[in-house]
Amino acid sequence: MKFNSGEVAQYLRENPQFFDEHADALADIYVSHPHGGRAISISQRQIVTLRNKNLALQEELRGLLKLGRENDAMNEKMHHLAIALFTSTDIKNLLYGLNLSLCKDFSMSHAVLRLWNLAGCTTNLPEFISTDSAIHIVTENLPCPYCGPNLTKEIMDWFGEEAALLHSFAMIPLRAEKTIGLLVLGDKEPRRFYPEMGTLYLKRLGDLISAAIMRHMLIE
């Protein structure tokens, strides 16, 4: 009777005592080395396999540790921002603290904020400059922060002459009882904000800023 390789493998899995009963056979069986053409024994091949698995696990662990350090660093930045926002004495002081934290803690040299639907707006601040209703609609329709290379022309104009230098953006809607504004971050590096990236921290950033603003303002 002739068996195919799958049947042989299945038999060995179901009958692990085979190698106990035929231990001497292991010494006589040679297979090819996974990283070269030379032949090695099954036991040597198993050692190579275990070594490769160990290397893969080490690489995965390094990745997890790196991610953990990055998350710790981000949480620390969010903590500093929260303190700056919720110790502000008025909306002007809040916006100053926000811009300072984005620049210093988050290394964001290009960030613009526009606010609307708020009563008693301080019109001498750039954040309260009137914005087109089309921007309100775009912001309203954002289910989560947008990351990528594209912005509408009006939003690009918010960055002034620096707009031509920027190649990736994050649009973060600000919401309370209704949408109250839009924070836009820009960067010269094309991969700083990209469509496939996670937006959890950007959403939390928007929630934090929105809550802080509502300490000083009322919905219109």
Image (cartoon, rainbow, N blue to C red):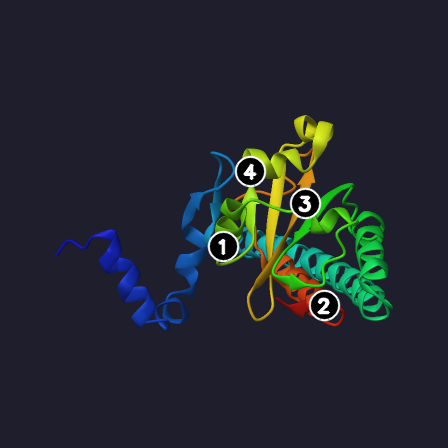
Mark 4 or 3 closer to N-term? 4
Per the rendering, the mark at residue 185 is 3
Identify the amino acid type marked 3: Leu
Residue 210 in view of the camera: yes
Image quadrant containing the N terminus: bottom left
The residue indicated by pointer 4 is 151
Q: Earlier in the sequence, mark 3 or mark 2?
A: 3
Q: Residue at x 43, y 57 (%)?
A: 26
Q: Residue 142: percent from the left, percent from the top?
A: 49, 54
- What is the spatial separation of the Cα atoms under label 3 and label 2, in whole angstroms? 23 Å
Q: Residue at x 54, y 37 (%)?
A: 152
**Closer to viewer: mark 3 or mark 2:** 2
In 3D space, how far apart are the residues under numbered discs 2 and 1 (Cα atoms)? 23 Å
Against 165, residue 130 (above or below) is below
Looking at marks 4 and 1 on the same chain, the residue that comes earlier in the sequence is marked by 1
Q: Nearer the viewer, residue 44 or 64?
A: 64
Which is nearer the N-term, disc 3 or disc 1?
1
Tell me the amino acid under the disc marked 1: Leu
Q: Of helix, strand and loop, which one carries label 2?
A: loop
Q: Nearer the viewer, residue 9 or 98?
A: 98
Residue at 76%, 63% in the rendered image:
78
**Distance of mark 4 from mark 3, alpha carbons?**
11 Å
- Numbered badge on residue 142: 1
Residue 93 falls in which quadrant of the image? bottom right
Residue 190 seen from this side: no
| Residue at which label 2 appears | 217
Label 1 neighbour load within 10 Å: few <14, some 14-19, many 20+: few
Task: Find the distance from the CA under tag 4 to the CA under tag 1.
Answer: 13 Å
